[in-house]
Amino acid sequence: HMGQVNEIDLGPQGGPLPVSHVLVVDDSRLQRRILAASLTRWGYRVTEAESGADALKICADTPPDIVLSDWMMPGMDGLEFCQAFRAMPRDRYGYFILLTSKTEKDAVARGLDCGADDFLNKPVNAAELRARINAGERIQRMEKELVEKNGLITTTLQQLQMLYDALDSDLIEAKKLQQSLVRERFYDFDQGQVSLLLRSSGHVGGDLVGVFPVCDGRIGLFGIDVSGHGISSALMTARLAGYLSATPDHNVALARQPDGTYAMLPPATVAAELNRLVLEDMETEHYFTLLLADVDLTTGHMRMVQAGHPHPVVQRADGKLETLGSGGLPVGLIAGASYEEFDLTLNKGDRLLIQSDGVNECPDPDGVQLDDEGLMDLLKDLSYVHGTALLETLVWKLADYAGGEDFPDDVSAILFEYCGDSTQ
């Protein structure tokens, strides 16, 4: 199995290649020396082995970058050695070249199946040898670059995961803070009961519901839905919660009277003032829909403004259902927008539902929205359920309609149930 290597000197123009460890495996000492001489001249670190068994020991101690192995050797031949070499654990890829005088296609196919990367026919031509070695080094360089890039990607992913975990933790806290804006979910007045629902589609959302005292026998109710989702929407709801605070001095809907009490401004006036505040004082592209109600608990009379919010639904004591309002412009969309009010009088046993569009626009698996009619059908079936239980059941019904508990939008609602004047 001896061949002749026609050594070539690339000279200074070619430049030395990065030092790679090449293992030459051949039972012919002369053949090994001829190959080793050329490889050493080209700047490679060369190790020799006279058998496949010796070569495996070398591979275990000092894994080579490139292997040149004769095919026909006593004991373990080149194919068996190649298979054993591929089975060894390695940190990086080893390039394997078989030296053979075989030219049959099936023999080449067997070599490839055993894990060989390339072939050199004996006698070995120096230029061809150098070309095949260079090809192997190119593959190893690409593998090294890929490993480095994968390492960079892994590090980046780890950093992103740490950032995500920190953000997730912050969002969990933010959700707690946003939920704290609705401190109580149930208010029991002598003349009526108010139940609140606030459920974000993500960690935080743009919906807000609330109730604030005006004076004896009078309360304000509001439902808000800020455009968009996520943190920026949630921050705006926090700002709006301050504008409609339970603290009278900070509530833009309340005006202090000469006797020190407070009265609620007309809801349409409050909507117009909020519109001015958003457009002039807030640097935001968000707008929001609003339903604001001034409730007289003694008479059951309510003054309301609807600013782009879904139509509220009134359910009479006899079960009759109807929607209210004519729509209106959202707040913070157009400068100088004006808003119209409408009135409602509830009698004993009547109730009012103020809901966000996450309820009306809840889609089923086919994308068909619940709509006002579907909501009224749900309320008709739940006429015997009251208070927070009604709102919880409404969420269950929505989940059943949507085919799952994950809603594409925030869901919020206010249920006001009028009990009548207890003094009468």
Image (cartoon, grey):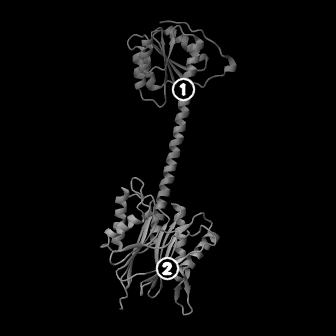
* Residue 15 in the image, given as x and y percentages of width and height: 66, 22
Residue 350 percent across, percent down from the top left: 37, 79
Q: Quadrant of residue 364?
A: bottom left
Compared with 228, 345 (above or below) is: below
Q: Residue 379 versus residue 16: which sits nearer the camera? A: 379
In this view, the residue in front, 338 or 187, is 338
Q: Which mark, residue 246?
A: 2
Eyeballing the image, is 254 above or below 378? below
Left or right: residue 327 versus residue 397 is right
The label on residue 139 is 1
**Residue shown at 51% from the left, 8% from the top:** 122
Crowding near pointer 2: few (<14 within 10 Å), some, many (20+)?
some
| Position of residue 366 measured from the top left corner of the image (x, y, whole percent) | 40, 52
Considering only order in the chain, which callout, 2 or 1, is on the residue closer to the N terminus? 1
Label 1 secondary element: helix
User: Quick one: quadrant of the C terminus?
Assistant: bottom left
- Nearer the observer, 285 or 10: 285
Q: Name the image quarter holding residue 274.
A: bottom right
The amino acid beneath tag 1 is Ile
Left-right relation of 48 to 277:
left
Q: Could you tell me which residue is drawn at 61 percent across and 11 percent down?
A: 7
Of the residues tagged 1 and 2, which is closer to the observer? Answer: 2
Residue 20 is at least partly visible in this image: no
| Residue 276 higher or lower than 421, as above or below | above
Give the number of callouts.
2
Is residue 364 visible to the viewer in this orientation of the structure? yes
Disc 2 is placed on an element classified as loop
Task: Return the mark for residue 68.
Answer: none
Q: CA distance from mark 1 to mark 2?
A: 71 Å
What residue type is disc 2 on? Ala
Residues 340 and 400: in front is 340
Left/right placement of residue 318 relative to residue 231 reads left
